[in-house]
Amino acid sequence: MNESLKAEHYERPQLKTPNGESSLLLHSCCAPCAGEIMEAVAASEIKTTVYFYNPNIHPIQEYELRKEENKRYCQKLDFNFIDGDYDKDNWFKRIKGLENEPERGERCTKCFDMRFERSALYAHENNFSLFATTLGISRWKDLDQVNNSGLRAADRYSGLNFWDFNWRKAGGSPRMIEISKREEFYQQEYCGCVYSLRDTNKWRKENNRPRVIRGQKYYS
Ligand code: SF4
């Protein structure tokens, strides 16, 4: 591994995939969540393709910004990057009736299901036998909710497994921040959908905090 990409003061262990798979399809939501995981699999010589499929992100300017940040880091690490569809109309159809659910509720389950079902389909059609997601590394997410959704998606295809590795453990969460700062990734201030933006701003108003300003905050 490129020495400049090593997290400081940390000797990365060699990760083993569940059944010795040598390649991985990694669904990615954004560069900050992906950075630590990408470096962990790169150090373990697991050939990884990043699959960016996130039609939940609103508005499109925010979507493009998060995507470009992730693509930039894929280019730096020489990872293959797959740009999935931005089929937001299907996303809105899928979560209809759940607009007022809280974060980590039923709307998020449907959101994960949609993104992982498409990831699983891509994996199936492109001869991957293992897929994973970056979503579970975020402390804002319910790890069981994320993993259950991934396992359900993998179950749709025989021979496909979901890697429910806990990327937060063994210092994964602080390294995620360290890498985000080092790479000066764009730092989004809400999960992604229009409802999470609405609820974040509502909370901020109630707590006398400024509204989210999209596209301006970077780790430094
Ligand atoms: S809050 Fe996040 S995970 Fe939940 S529905 Fe919105 S974008 Fe998806």
Image (cartoon, rainbow, N blue to C red):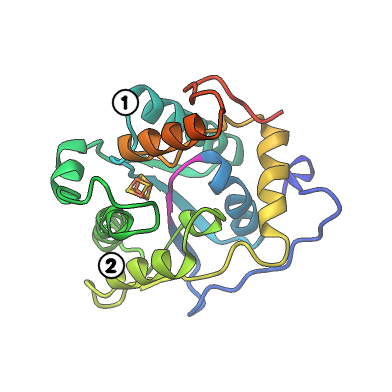
> Looking at the picture, does residue 191 appear above or below residue 108?
above
- Which residue is pictured at 47% across the width and 37% down the height? 203
Mark 2, Cα crowd under 10 Å, few <14 / some 14-19 / many 20+, is many
| Percent x, y of residue 101 | 29, 52
Give SS at disc 1. helix
What label sits on residue 5 in the rendered view? none
* Residue 143 versus residue 134 in the image, above or below: below
Vertical order, 98 against 73 (above or below): below
Residue 170: quadrant of the picture: bottom right
- On the picture, is 130 further left or further right than 73? left
x, y percentage for residue 120? 29, 61
How many other residues sit within 10 Å of disc 1, few (<14), some (14-19) or many (≥20)?
Answer: few
Name the mark on residue 153.
2
For label 2, the SS is helix
Q: Which one is in front, 101 or 48?
A: 101
- Residue at x 51% of width, y 32% of height: 204
Is residue 204 highlighted in magenta?
A: no
Which residue is found at the position 48% from the left and 57% from the top?
141
Residue that appears at 29% across and 57% down: 126
Q: Nearer the viewer, residue 108 or 170?
A: 108
Q: Amino acid at mark 2?
A: Ala
How far apart in space, not on screen, are marks 2 and 1 (Cα)? 26 Å
Provide residue 84's location: percent of width, then percent of height.
29, 41
Residue 184: x and y in percent read 66, 29
Where is mark 1, residue-wise? 60
Magenta span of residues: 26-30
Q: Quadrant of residue 171?
A: bottom right
Q: Label 1 near label 2: C-beta < 8 Å?
A: no
Main secondary-structure element of the magenta-colored stretch: strand
